[in-house]
Image: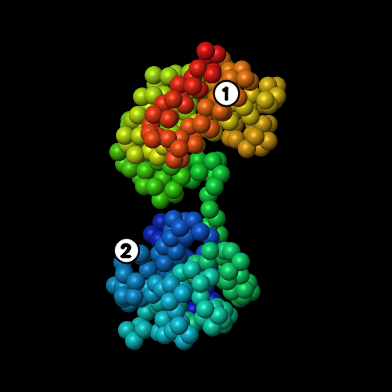
């Protein structure tokens, strides 16, 4: 039998743990952040640890062991409703109450949540999610003062953090990917964590061995090779036929012309920034100064071969003209991009 108490909830441990050992779940937890995937996973872990596996019950319905999950939005709660949600079930067993976006709670409901956290009910686990901004900050402070468990799920913004996220996803699946494969996956899928997690799961299930750049490109053929950044790379490297081919494929697969011209601008701007930096300094030393990952600096240094400062300046002008054409001044975005790519290649070769 599962035992519940106000300080937390204890539930039988997994079979892998020593017999009789129990896992304690805090009676009140607050998950802070706006990275939705990480927030949802944190909620699921608490629910599962409380003996309420997420696939064993639907919100608001009793699970097989008699416990119930109540999943509500804070903005929808009216004063007094929290007491009803956390009331003991007539059929016995515990209750898990999930209150999402607690920063949107009304003043009265926020006060109720704070009072509840100071004296939680037995047989109840309360889980709140909070965006973490200034809105609802007083509630966060009250929860912390009451000893609620806090779990932070900040937005993953930095390139290195995204790589680490991908590594952890493959590790969870018992797989390994090399750095080139991870970068190719980011190029192919983008930065949305849900999309990346789904891509990792698919690659883990559908491939064998180390997940390399070649494996990612085989799996996402076309998508991984026809992003705006690939078009830009081929252009600044002076590979005109490949750049045009990738451009046409990218446009055919729905890549926005605005994103492509933005990638071209970043590619040319990278040439200028890295080209003007000291050649004697390592990529690691320049990373913070230039705001670029070391691997990107190394790549741009290779692309700089054949470029002179005046050529980079002319390429900047070509990209600026294309940007105006793509954003409304021209009749054909595709044609404007082809002209820009041709000009960039010509600037590199000096023709």
Q: Nearer the viewer, mark 1 or mark 2?
A: 1
Residue drawn 40% across the image and 77% down it: 95
For the N terminus, the image quarter is bottom left
Q: CA distance from mark 1 to mark 2?
A: 59 Å
Q: Find out whether the residues at labels 1 and 2 contact each other: C-beta distance under 8 Å.
A: no
The image shows residue 135 at horizontal and vertical percentages of 58, 69
Q: Identify the image quadrant of residue 173.
A: top left
* Label 1 CA crowd tier, 10 Å (few <14, some 14–19, many 20+): some
Residue drawn 56% across the image and 44% down it: 158
The image shows residue 312 at horizontal and vertical percentages of 59, 23
> Camera-side residue: 51 or 255?
255
Residue drawn 39% across the image and 47% down it: 195
Q: Label 2: state its secondary structure.
A: loop
Judge whether 22 appears above or below 80 on screen: above
The image shows residue 16 at horizontal and vertical percentages of 41, 56
The label number, if any, that marks residue 314 in the structure image: 1
Q: Label 1: state its secondary structure.
A: helix
Residue 11 in view of the camera: no
Residue 23 in view of the camera: yes
* Label 2 CA crowd tier, 10 Å (few <14, some 14–19, many 20+): few
* Residue hosting label 2: 55
Mark closer to the chain start, 1 or 2: 2
> Camera-side residue: 199 or 321?
321
Residue drawn 52% across the image and 78% down it: 106
């Amino acid at each position: 039998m599962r035992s519940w108490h106000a300080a937390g909830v204890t539930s039988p441990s997994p079979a892998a743990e020593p017999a009789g050992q129990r896992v304690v779940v805090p009676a009140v937890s607050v998950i802070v952040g706006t990275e939705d995937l990480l927030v949802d996973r944190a909620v699921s872990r608490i629910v599962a640890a409380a003996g309420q596996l997420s696939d064993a019950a639907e919100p608001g319905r009793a699970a097989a062991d008699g416990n119930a999950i109540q999943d509500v939005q804070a903005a929808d709660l009216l004063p007094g409703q929290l007491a009803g949600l956390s009331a003991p079930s007539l059929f016995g067993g515990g209750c898990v109450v999930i209150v999402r976006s607690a920063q949107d709670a009304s003043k009265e409901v926020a006060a109720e949540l704070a009072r509840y956290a100071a004296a939680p009910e037995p047989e109840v686990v309360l889980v709140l999610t909070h965006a973490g901004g200034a809105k609802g900050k007083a509630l966060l402070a009250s929860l912390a003062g009451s000893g609620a468990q806090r779990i932070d799920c900040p937005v993953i913004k930095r390139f290195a953090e995204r790589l680490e996220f991908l590594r952890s996803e493959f590790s969870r699946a018992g797989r390994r990917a090399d750095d080139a494969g991870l970068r190719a996956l980011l190029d192919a899928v983008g930065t949305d964590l849900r999309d990346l997690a789904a891509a990792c799961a698919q690659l883990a299930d559908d491939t064998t061995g180390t997940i390399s750049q070649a494996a990612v490109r085989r799996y996402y053929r076309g998508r991984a090779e026809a992003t705006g950044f690939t078009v830009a790379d081929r252009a600044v490297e002076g590979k005109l036929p490949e750049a045009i081919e990738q451009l046409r494929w990218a446009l055919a697969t729905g890549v926005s012309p605005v994103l492509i011209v933005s990638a071209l601008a970043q590619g040319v701007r990278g040439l200028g920034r890295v080209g003007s930096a000291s050649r004697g300094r390592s990529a690691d030393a320049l990373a913070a100064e230039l705001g670029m990952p070391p691997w990107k600096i190394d790549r741009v240094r290779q692309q700089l071969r054949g470029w002179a400062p005046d050529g980079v300046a002319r390429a900047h002008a070509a990209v600026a003209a294309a940007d105006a054409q793509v954003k409304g001044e021209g009749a054909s975005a595709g044609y404007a991009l082809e002209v820009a790519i041709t000009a960039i290649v010509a600037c590199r070769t000096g023709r």
